[in-house]
Image (cartoon, rainbow, N blue to C red):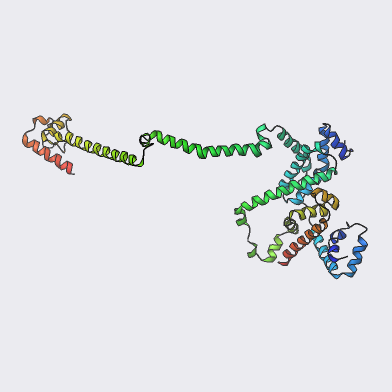
Amino acid sequence: MRDRSDLELVQLFQKGDEASFNHLVLRYQEKVYRVARRFINDHDSADDVTQEVFCKAYESLRDFRAESSLYTWLYRITVNIALNTLRRQKVRKFFRLDEVFDVEDTSTVPPDEALEKKEEKELIEEAIGTLPEKQKAVFILRYYEELPYEEIGKILKTSVGGLKANYFHAVKKIQEHVRRAHGTR
Amino acid sequence: MRTEHVEYLLPDYLNNMLEESLRPWVEAHLQECGACRAELENLRAAFSHLDAFEARPPYDGYFTTVLPRVRERLQGKKSTPFFAHPLITRFAAPIVVGAMLLFILFRVPSALRESDQEHNPLQPVVRGLETEELVDVILDQIHRETISAQAENETSAMLAVPFLRSDHLLAGADQISLSNESILDIGQTENLDQLSSSEVDVLVANLGERTIL
């Protein structure tokens, strides 16, 4: 079963073979989790997204017509669910005013100390978190997943034309964010 | 090639992801364009930071837990009762809740009003009256209450008259066999019939003092 292609597993599943779905989950769970984790910087939410992606895939797989590759299709589901999760988190964060007031006022902390507190990884995570949705998706899929622009276009259901510009501006914004943080030293 | 077109290719150029056909073109442009060379260096610095960022791996054994939990979640969705179906929860449930709220908002106050009417004896009288008739009813009611209060006072006064007489007081006191020594310190007798008139006077005086106190 492990040697079968994605399409063969899908066809088996469509004929009622439940075990083939298990193989698809095992085959793609790491990729799905990794992408989800790039979007959302906490394990629990990324884990929830991962499970939801496969549940959604299970429900929709019977209608899968192989117009795109399975991994493109799974990436699309992952990006959509991850972005929805991010939106919900933003709304929750917006209404959680107590946490806003609990945020440490770093303006009173010496710049050197403040930057020391913030590790480089956190800085990058923070920078990616500030990107607009589309730029974030393009950046993650291109830089971390190394997908071709054509695939990214299919995943995001957008033309390839603007993707390079999106990618460029995403990198520039991350760079700017990091530069500003280092500038406070 | 214009600068802005080349700069969009620079991220892929730096990461060796640029199409081979474009690579010589970009390199030739970089030799001529100082702005793009500066941009390239900026991007190189940015990617050096990015390369340091690795997504935090999940705990050991995490990927052995995904499939069982996906299956469990799917089973939960399958066994979800019909009233938890997304169509129900998304559309039907809000409609039912809305209808209940409307019922509570409009029906319950109305029921309370009806309940008030049942308990208020004036409601059936007042209902349907013109304003002038209503004024008459209210004035009549006030008049009746005034008469009733006066009659009560008069009755109380009439009933009180016999008790104002001292012999009635003494007779009543005899019947309840007063034993308060502070009052009966004129003698140890408890039978008021046996008291002399002077003793009765003393007793009345004592009772008067006690009443004042």
B134 vs B91, left or right, is: left
> Is residue B152 among the parts visible in the rendering?
yes
Q: Residue at x 53, y 37 (%)?
A: B103
> Is residue B61 among the parts visible in the rendering?
no
State the image coordinates of residue A38 (x, y, percent, origin top left). 77, 51
**Along the line of sight, the residue nearer the viewer: B206 or A69:** A69
Q: Residue at x 27, y 38 (%)?
A: B145
| Quadrant for the N terminus of chain B in the image | bottom right
State the image coordinates of residue B149 (x, y, percent, origin top left). 24, 38
| Quadrant for the C terminus of chain B in the image | top left
**Along the line of sight, the residue nearer the viewer: B64 or B34:** B34
Picture quadrant where residue B212 is located = top left
State the image coordinates of residue B37 (x, y, percent, origin top left). 85, 67
**On screen, residue A12 above or below A143:** above
B27 vs A154, left or right, is: right
Picture quadrant where residue A28 is located = top right
Q: Residue at x 77, y 44 (%)?
A: A77
**Along the line of sight, the residue nearer the viewer: B84 or B202:** B84
State the image coordinates of residue B41 (x, y, percent, origin top left). 83, 66
A55 vs A15, left or right, is: left
Q: How many marks?
A: 0
Q: Residue at x 68, y 64 (%)?
A: A113
Q: Residue furthest left?
A: B197
